[in-house]
Amino acid sequence: MKLVYLMSAAAILMAGNAQAAESTVSNNQNNSANIKARIGATIQGVNDSVSLTSAAIANTMTLEGGQADYLSNFQFFRGDSVAELNGTITNVSGDVNATAAAIANSATISVDYARTIQNTQMAGVDPTAILGATISGVSENVEATAAAISNTATINGDFGYLGSYQVNGAAVNAIAGLNVSNVQGTVSVTAAAIGNTLTVKGF
């Protein structure tokens, strides 16, 4: 009998297959400092592709393995996470990719099987992503993204019990202002502000 208990503004489902496992992993991350990433760039006359990324991440955890008895993740953030990207990009022969990403708590768990998985993520101050760019004269595609996320977790694998608790008490801000012209390929612009997100697959 599989049990799943989820408390979150964005939650999902589960089940699994039981096997014996002995490993135990417990992760505890607590950050109350400000996290800031800034890029200001002028780029022109490039004969290949251009990729710019400004990323401010307070707490991040990646766990990959085979079998485990108990996996626990606790992440708490009460600082200020800000990612800012401002750029002028002209005359590029390849693709242009510009990303500003501000994340409070991020967890990725990928296992064959775990008897118990417990995920707790709490954010209390605003993650903010700001993207401002002028892009012109591009021979291929343009992709621009401003993404601000308080709590995000991805769990991949079979399990006996999964409990996930996500709390966001902050404003989440994603701002994109772009001037794009003379592009031969496709143009994709995204501004995404997410409080809590959980993805579960593979069970």
Image (spheres, rainbow, N blue to C red):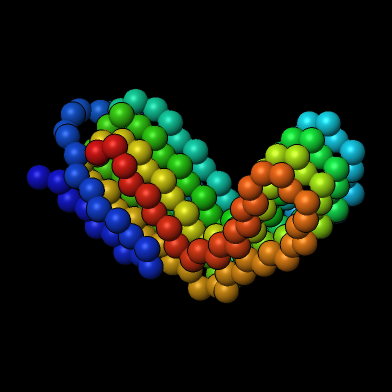
Q: Position of residue 119 (x, y in %)?
A: 38, 51
Q: Position of residue 66 (x, y in %)?
A: 34, 25
Q: Quadrant of the N terminus?
A: top left
Answer left or right for 13 relative to 45. left
Which residue is at a point 45% across and 35% down the rendered structure image?
Answer: 63
Q: Where is residue 25 in the image (x, y as percent from the top left)?
A: 40, 37
Which residue is at the front of the view, 149 or 134? 134
Q: Which residue lies furthest to the left in this view?
A: 1
Which residue is at the front of the view, 73 or 17? 17
Which residue is at a point 63% across and 66% down the rendered structure image?
Answer: 174
Picture quadrant of residue 147: bottom right
Q: In which quarter of the image is the C terminus?
A: top left
Answer left or right for 92 relative to 26. right
Q: Position of residue 33 (x, y in %)?
A: 68, 60
Which residue is at a point 74% across and 62% down the rendered structure image?
Answer: 178
Which residue is at the front of the view, 79 or 135? 135
Instruction: Please determine whether, in this image, residue 69 is positioned above or below residue 164.
Output: above
- Is residue 13 visible to the viewer in this orientation of the structure? yes
Instruction: Please determine whether, in this image, residue 142 is positioned above or below residue 133.
Output: above
Answer left or right for 155 relative to 93. left
Q: Which residue lies furthest to the top in this view?
A: 66
Which residue is at a point 19% across and 44% down the rendered structure image?
Answer: 15
Which residue is at the front of the view, 125 or 144? 144
- How many discs mark residues in the rendered view? 0
